Image (tube, rainbow, N blue to C red):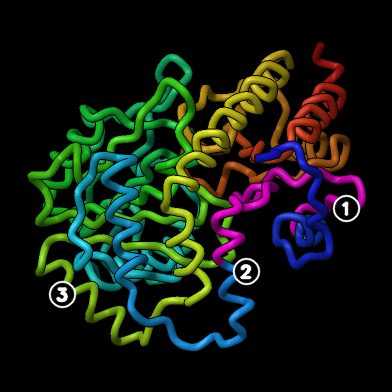
């Protein structure tokens, strides 16, 4: 497991590297892509070996007999997260953005609204709006430098049109690993307002030392009748191109509604993704994830120390994910000036905070899941780009 290995991703059809000039104006020749949420690390050997065996077979027909795949999911959730699942409850989607879209179609109608705790993953906003649903934004409160939920304020923001609450757990972009008490508050809020709770837990394995992820199904089993869980191996093992995610629904009525939408769209699994996911959810995959999280924590410390040394710039303390959420409001600069310094002077491509919703206006999201030398280079460039503030 050499996370410092230099892997050339330019010219490989990588969205992160090959599209950053088109999207951000940052040339891949000398730019550093810290935007798209995938990692610059080679997938674990267990995944590569499984894929190689499949490729070497030379026949790529429809995938059948998914018992090993389902058992791998059951084993992983039980051993890593203390969550016992029924394999009959598992649906395989083309990633979890697709899973979220299917949930929106299954559990709401055009004109209904979906609740988001904002700022939150920008793709949620895009998918909800494209489905002709409204978005009810419940802004997260900034308390002691981290996000918390403010349920005392949320009831007044509800319109009565809401049918779904879409939770990001762990939180992207703030990196919060929600506590059991916080998850139970979300569950109680969903019960109070009669909402289907969809918990997107795609980052559930990317937990930094000292913190522990609790699946919503474990934190609040009493709301199984309104709970939809979403998990995936794609973020954890850097196989996002496989577009393979799991929507796990234990309630029969909710399951029936989801199955009808999925069946109506003719969605079936991607065989390459199923082979990769089965191999990933294994003892070898667990060993790789443990080493990865330690490495990411080292990158986080370097990034945060460097960023926090720039006057007026603050990186939110992370508990999970590899996505730093950086506030530039203290610089006194407008967004155009901040972005000029990041993209033109430092030559770094990032995600701007505005598409993440209310509360994201002064932030940018930085992906530090790359080799440490590149993180150090990025920090140095940012310190130089904002050097007049020193």
In the image, residue 222 lies at what x, y percent? 7, 44
Of the 4 image quadrants, the one containing the C terminus is: top right
The local secondary structure at tag 1 comes to: loop
Q: Quadrant of residue 192?
A: top left
Along the line of sight, which residue is nearer the eye, 26 or 7? 7
N-terminal of the pair, mark 2 or mark 1, is 1
Given residues 48 and 21, the one toward you in this image is 48
- Where, quadrant-wise, is the N terminus in this rendering? top right
Badge nearest the viewer, 2 or 3:
2
Please provide percent x and percent y for residue 42: 67, 51
Residues in magenta, as a range: 23-50
Main SS of the magenta part reads: loop
Residue visible at 52% across and 22% down in the picture? 317
Q: Which residue is mark 1?
A: 27
Residue 148: image location, x then y, percent: 35, 27
Q: Is residue 308 left or right of residue 139?
A: right
Residue annotated with mark 3: 256
The answer to if 44 sits in the magenta stretch is yes
Distance from disc 2 to disc 3, alpha carbons, whole Å, reads 36 Å
Asked whether, in this view, residue 214 is left or right of residue 50, the answer is left
Residue 155 appears anywhere in the view: no
| Residue that carries the numbered disc 2 in the rendered image | 52
The residue lying at 57 percent from left, 87 percent from top is: 59
Tell us which disc is closer to us: 2 or 1.
2
Q: Are marks 2 and 3 in contact (CB under 8 Å)?
A: no
Q: Residues within 10 Å of mark 3 (few under 14, many from 20)?
A: few
Badge nearest the viewer, 3 or 1: 3
Q: Kindly tell me whether residue 235 is visible in this rendering.
A: yes
Residue lying at the far right of the rendered structure: 29
Task: Determine the secondary structure under disc 3.
Answer: helix
């Amino acid at each position: 497991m050499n996370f410092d290995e230099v892997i050339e991703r330019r010219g490989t059809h990588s969205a992160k590297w090959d599209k950053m000039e088109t999207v951000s104006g940052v040339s891949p020749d000398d730019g550093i892509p810290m935007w798209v949420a995938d990692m610059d690390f080679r997938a674990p050997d267990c995944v590569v070996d499984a894929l190689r065996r499949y490729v070497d077979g030379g026949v790529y027909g429809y995938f059948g007999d998914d018992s090993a795949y389902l058992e791998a999911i059951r084993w992983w959730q039980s051993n890593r997260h203390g969550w016992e699942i029924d394999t009959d409850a598992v649906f395989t989607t083309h990633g979890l953005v697709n899973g979220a879209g299917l949930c929106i179609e299954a559990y709401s109608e055009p004109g209904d609204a979906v609740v988001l705790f904002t700022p939150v993953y920008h793709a949620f906003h895009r998918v909800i709006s494209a489905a002709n649903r409204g978005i009810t934004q419940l802004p997260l409160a900034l308390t002691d430098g981290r996000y918390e939920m403010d349920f005392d304020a949320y009831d007044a923001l509800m319109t009565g049109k809401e049918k779904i609450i879409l939770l990001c757990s762990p939180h992207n972009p703030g990196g919060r690993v929600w506590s059991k008490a916080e998850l139970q508050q979300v569950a109680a809020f969903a019960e109070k307002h009669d909402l289907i709770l969809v918990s997107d837990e795609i980052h559930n394995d990317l937990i930094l030392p000292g913190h522990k992820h609790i699946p919503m199904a474990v934190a609040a089993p009493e709301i199984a009748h309104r709970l939809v869980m979403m998990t995936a191996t794609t973020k954890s093992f850097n196989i996002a191109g496989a577009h393979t995610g799991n929507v796990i629904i234990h309630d029969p009525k909710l399951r029936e509604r989801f199955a009808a939408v999925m069946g109506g769209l003719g969605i079936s699994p991607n065989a390459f993704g199923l082979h990769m996911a089965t191999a990933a959810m294994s003892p070898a995959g667990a060993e790789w994830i443990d080493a990865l999280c330690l490495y990411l924590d080292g990158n986080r410390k370097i990034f945060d120390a460097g960023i926090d040394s720039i006057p007026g710039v603050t990186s939110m303390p992370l508990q999970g994910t590899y996505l730093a959420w950086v506030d530039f409001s203290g610089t006194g600069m407008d967004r155009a000036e901040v972005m000029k310094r990041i993209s033109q002077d430092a030559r770094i491509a990032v995600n701007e905070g505005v598409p993440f919703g209310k509360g994201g206006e002064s932030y940018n999201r930085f992906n530090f899941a790359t080799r440490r030398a590149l993180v150090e280079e990025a920090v140095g460039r940012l310190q130089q780009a904002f050097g007049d503030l020193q």
